[in-house]
Image (cartoon, rainbow, N blue to C red):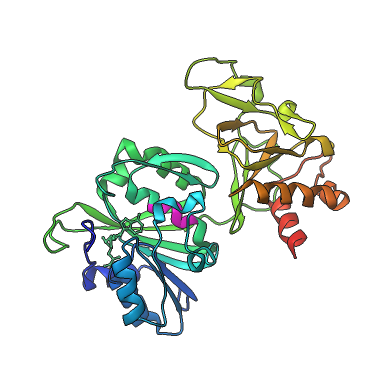
């Protein structure tokens, strides 16, 4: 049995699951399911007609669950590595399709206290428990919910702040209750029940001059992120902790120049593989650029990135934009300089794939 296995007591499981507002979810998942206590309560609440997805790194748990719950979809994947594409096929298939993620993630991971993951195209370093939350987001449907038992430290430690802030850009994070220290038998962690739901989309008003960055998952493998760094107050910086700045001038002949300007920024960061396009201006084929490097870059508010899991997907997306150039260029509208929004781009990507 894994050393970080702590069964979720039934009363706590009910309390967590009762926080869902969904009366008829279709898919409920627990990515660190252990012996499946949380999912068993979900099954009692919503019945056996829902799809229950159970994953645990421990092969022994997965084997037991397959035997005991043959109607569940069970996998044994290291959930902290899913952002690298290391994932069982029957789990990967559910990216973007889960209505409710329920989690009581491991608080430490083989003694590891920090891990790095990818949240909507942004590289973040955080605790293993928070990385479980970050990685769960790629599995959620747009109106999905994450219900999670989190160590209190994840909510207020400096280690998790950057990741939590990044999550809060697009999601509401609500603490439902603080648990008593004796909520789990044989260990006394300070934990809380937390609910995470996506913020409703802003109205369809143009966001041309806004400084707010926006990001959107538009499918299992693609995030769209709009940059937010305003060029008029970018100092040219060369300090060690700077990253390359990508503005529309860095988009040249289908490639992204990374040697022009450096900037110190903790926002609008993205790493490849990605396709980066200008957000404003008359669309030009030469400015549809692939960024293959996994090096982090900061995006100016004049560009938008489509972030993919691998370079093949990025190349396919670039071909799609170029093949449907007329339709794509029509997404740039406006009374002054034409511009494209994250919404219009995501609609284009969706409809082009159909
Ligand atoms: C606190 S227990 C979860 C209990 C379970 N959800 C329940 O309802 O009883 C944490 C589980 O996370 C699993 N785990 C640890 N690291 C993992 C990883 N990287 N990927 C997937 N599961 C992991 C452990 O094997 C353990 O079963």
Which residues, given as a range, are shown in magenta? 132-137
x and y percentages locating residue 102 in the rendered image: 37, 65
Most common SS among magenta residues: helix
x and y percentages locating residue 287 in the rendered image: 78, 35
Front-lying residue, 136 or 66: 66
Q: In which quarter of the image is residue 283?
A: top right
Tell me what residue is drawn at x 49 percent, y 31 percent.
266
Left or right of 224, for residue 6: left
Left or right of 316, for residue 214: left
x and y percentages locating residue 66 in the rendered image: 36, 77
Asked if 59 appears above or below 48 in the picture, the reply is: above
Tell me what residue is drawn at x 55 percent, y 15 percent.
237
x and y percentages locating residue 189 in the rendered image: 18, 53
Asked if 265 appears above or below 225 in the picture, the reply is: above
Residue 21 visible to an observer of this rendering: no
Question: In the rendered image, which quarter contains the C terminus?
Answer: bottom right
Tell me what residue is drawn at x 27 percent, y 71 percent.
35
Q: Is residue 197 on the magenta stretch?
A: no
Front-lying residue, 339 or 203: 339
Question: In the rendered image, which quarter contains the N terminus?
Answer: bottom left
The quadrant of the rendered image in which ligand 1 is seen is: bottom left
Residue at the outermost right position: 326
Tell me what residue is drawn at x 50 percent, y 49 percent.
84
């Amino acid at each position: 049995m894994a050393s970080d296995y702590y069964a979720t007591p039934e009363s706590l499981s009910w309390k967590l699951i009762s926080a869902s507002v969904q009366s008829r979810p279709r898919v409920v998942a627990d990515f660190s399911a252990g012996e499946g206590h949380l999912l068993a309560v979900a099954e009692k609440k919503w019945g056996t007609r829902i799809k229950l997805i159970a994953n645990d790194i421990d092969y022994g748990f997965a084997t037991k669950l397959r035997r005991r719950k043959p109607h569940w979809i069970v996998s044994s994947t290291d959930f902290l590595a899913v952002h690298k594409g290391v994932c069982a096929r029957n789990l990967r298939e559910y990216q973007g399709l889960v209505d409710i993620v329920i989690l009581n993630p491991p608080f430490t991971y083989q003694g590891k206290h920090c891990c790095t993951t990818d949240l909507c195209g942004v590289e973040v370093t955080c605790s293993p428990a928070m990385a479980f939350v970050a990685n769960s987001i790629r599995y959620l449907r747009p109106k999905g919910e994450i219900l999670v038992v989190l160590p209190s430290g994840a909510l207020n430690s400096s280690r998790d702040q950057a990741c939590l802030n990044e999550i809060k850009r697009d999601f509401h994070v609500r603490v439902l209750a603080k648990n008593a220290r004796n909520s789990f038998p044989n260990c006394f962690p300070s934990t809380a029940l937390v609910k995470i739901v996506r913020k409703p989309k802003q109205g369809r008003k143009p966001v041309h001059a806004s400084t707010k960055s926006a990001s959107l998952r538009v499918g299992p493998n693609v995030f769209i992120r709009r940059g937010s760094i305003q060029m008029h107050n970018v100092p040219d910086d060369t300090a060690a902790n700077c990253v390359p700045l990508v503005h529309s001038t860095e988009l040249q002949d289908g490639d992204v120049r990374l040697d022009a300007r450096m900037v110190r920024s903790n926002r609008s960061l993205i790493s490849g593989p990605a396709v980066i396009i200008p957000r404003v201006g008359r669309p030009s084929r030469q400015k549809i650029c692939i960024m293959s490097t996994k090096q982090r870059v900061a995006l100016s508010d004049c560009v938008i990135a489509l972030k993919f899991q691998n370079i093949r997907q990025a190349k396919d997306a670039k071909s799609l934009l170029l093949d449907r150039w007329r339709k794509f260029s029509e997404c740039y509208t406006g009374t002054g300089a034409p511009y494209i929004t994250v919404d219009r781009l995501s609609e284009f990507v969706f409809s082009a794939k159909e």
